[in-house]
Image (tube, rainbow, N blue to C red):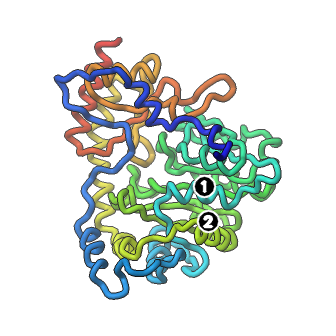
């Protein structure tokens, strides 16, 4: 067996399963889960039709092996969306690639860019999406957890990373909007990170899968957009996006990467050997999804209405506020986050994820301790019911 597997920690949801072992939730309440960030809004009908129609379109069925680089029409759909969304002009032949969701791409990317023949460090936020750590460790690198600043909505403090760490760093994972905090990186922070990349030569992987769910009038800044605003090219910069949250199709496993053409050429080579080609049927439906914004606007409006109703209810008893973007609430809770999650499940049959499961202890403290992540992905009525149960629960434990 690969000895690097022993470096992996249990995934947060396995830890949650262990935390709930032996607990029988109160049968007076139907179960409500705010634990997993899995979109629950209905998939738009036009995407379903595109999937179905592709099955019966000559040359688009399942009888052939699809090219790993994707169909030209799909890559053109990517760059058209990038132009509309960010005002960027990319080459569909060299600067974009389809991926089977951002999760598998983030993991595979680390395997492509890490040189484990020399000391390698991967810097990631803390708290963070757990794939970053697993991708780093299985690529033979060490992970360094850059501290977040609670005073700035848990924005990453890049300046706090020591120079000796930067000298070993080959890859930095950025998540903006952030999971679990919802923080969006402003242009000034991107400028700092680009300057560090220029100085030390590391690659930046910008995870932007929550970019289309936001609560302010101005959409979140993207990594490539930040580079363009600063007059830079995309050297050592690759961004990742997905249809899962934007279009409510997590089961389709469809996204794309964009940026540095030289890196993407090597990433395509890796993916060709890895066997990561996207089904032609999924490609056809993806073209339809990336080409339409009406359903995205409607989806965003649903989240805005939901958060506007649920957040004030929870804010009465928890340290929580509206995030910049994404569909999570990152809430401070009284006492232990693990005990809070376990007792809430036992008494009121509501599942939340302990924040300490999404972070690592550094300098004697876990930045997720005392917080829980709530995924407001279900319909508004269900999320409101969960919030009201949480209010009642907090009233009992205080």
**Image quadrant containing the C terminus:** top left
Q: Nearer the viewer, residue 228 or 197?
A: 197
Residue drawn at (26%, 68%) of the image: 48
Q: Is residue 42 left or right of residue 95?
A: left
Could you tell me if residue 233 is visible in this image?
A: no
Q: Which residue is mark 1?
A: 187
Q: Is residue 300 left or right of residue 142?
A: left
Q: Secondary structure at mark 2?
A: helix
* Callouts 1 and 2 close, C-beta under 8 Å: yes
Residue 22: quarter of image: top left
**Image quadrant containing the N terminus:** top right
Q: Which mark is residue 243?
A: none
Q: Residues within 10 Å of mark 1 (few under 14, many from 20)?
A: some
Distance, label 1 to label 2, CA atoms, is 8 Å
Q: Secondary structure at mark 1?
A: helix
Q: Which residue is mark 2?
A: 229
As drawn, the residue found furthest toward the bottom would be 58
Q: Nearer the viewer, residue 165 or 349?
A: 349
Residue 17: quarter of image: top left
Q: Position of residue 45 (x, y in %)?
A: 22, 67
Q: Position of residue 314 (x, y in %)?
A: 32, 29
Relative to residue 107, is residue 3 depicted above or below?
above
Relative to residue 124, is residue 366 depicted above or below?
above
Q: Position of residue 117 (x, y in %)?
A: 81, 54
Q: Nearer the viewer, residue 60 or 125?
A: 60
Relative to residue 299, is residue 66 depicted above or below?
below
Residue drawn at (48%, 23%) of the image: 370
Residue drawn at (61%, 42%) of the image: 125
Q: Nearer the viewer, residue 56 or 90?
A: 56
């Amino acid at each position: 067996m690969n000895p690097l597997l022993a470096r992996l920690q249990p995934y947060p949801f396995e830890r949650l399963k262990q935390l709930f072992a032996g607990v029988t939730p109160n049968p007076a309440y139907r179960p409500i889960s705010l634990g997993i960030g899995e979109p629950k809004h209905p998939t738009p009908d036009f995407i379903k039709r595109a999937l179905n129609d592709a099955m019966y379109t000559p040359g688009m069925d399942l009888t052939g092996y699809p090219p790993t680089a994707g169909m030209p029409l799909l890559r053109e759909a990517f760059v058209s969306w990038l132009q509309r969304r960010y005002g960027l002009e990319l080459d569909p032949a060299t600067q974009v690639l389809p991926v089977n969701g951002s999760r598998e791409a983030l993991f595979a990317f680390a395997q492509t860019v890490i040189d484990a023949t020399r000391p390698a460090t991967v810097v990631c936020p803390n708290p963070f999406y757990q794939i970053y750590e697993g991708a780093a460790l299985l690529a033979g690198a060490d992970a360094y957890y850059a501290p977040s600043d609670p005073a700035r909505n848990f924005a990453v403090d890049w300046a706090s990373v020591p120079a000796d760490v930067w000298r070993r760093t080959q890859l930095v994972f950025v998540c903006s909007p952030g999971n679990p905090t919802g923080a969006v990186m402003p242009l000034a922070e991107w400028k700092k990170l680009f300057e560090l990349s220029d100085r030390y030569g590391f690659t930046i992987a910008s995870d932007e899968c929550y970019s289309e769910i936001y609560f302010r009038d101005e959409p979140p800044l993207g990594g490539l957009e930040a580079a363009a605003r600063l007059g830079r090219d995309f050297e050592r910069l690759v961004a990742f996006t997905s249809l899962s949250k934007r279009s409510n199709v997590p089961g389709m496993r469809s996204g794309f990467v964009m940026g540095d053409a030289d890196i993407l050429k090597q990433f395509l080579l890796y993916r060709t050997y890895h066997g990561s080609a996207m089904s032609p049927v999924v490609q056809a439906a993806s073209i339809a999804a990336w080409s339409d914004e009406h359903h995205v606007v409607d989806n965003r409006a649903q989240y805005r209405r939901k958060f506007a109703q649920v957040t004030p209810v929870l804010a009465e008893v928890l340290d929580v506020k509206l995030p910049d973007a994404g569909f999570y609430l990152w809430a401070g809770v009284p006492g232990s986050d693990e005990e809070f999650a376990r007792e809430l499940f036992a008494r009121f049959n509501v599942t939340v994820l302990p924040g300490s499961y999404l972070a690592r202890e550094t300098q004697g403290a876990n930045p997720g301790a005392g917080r829980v992540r709530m995924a407001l992905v279900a319909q508004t009525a269900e999320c409101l019911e969960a919030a009201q149960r949480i209010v009642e629960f907090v009233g009992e434990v205080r």
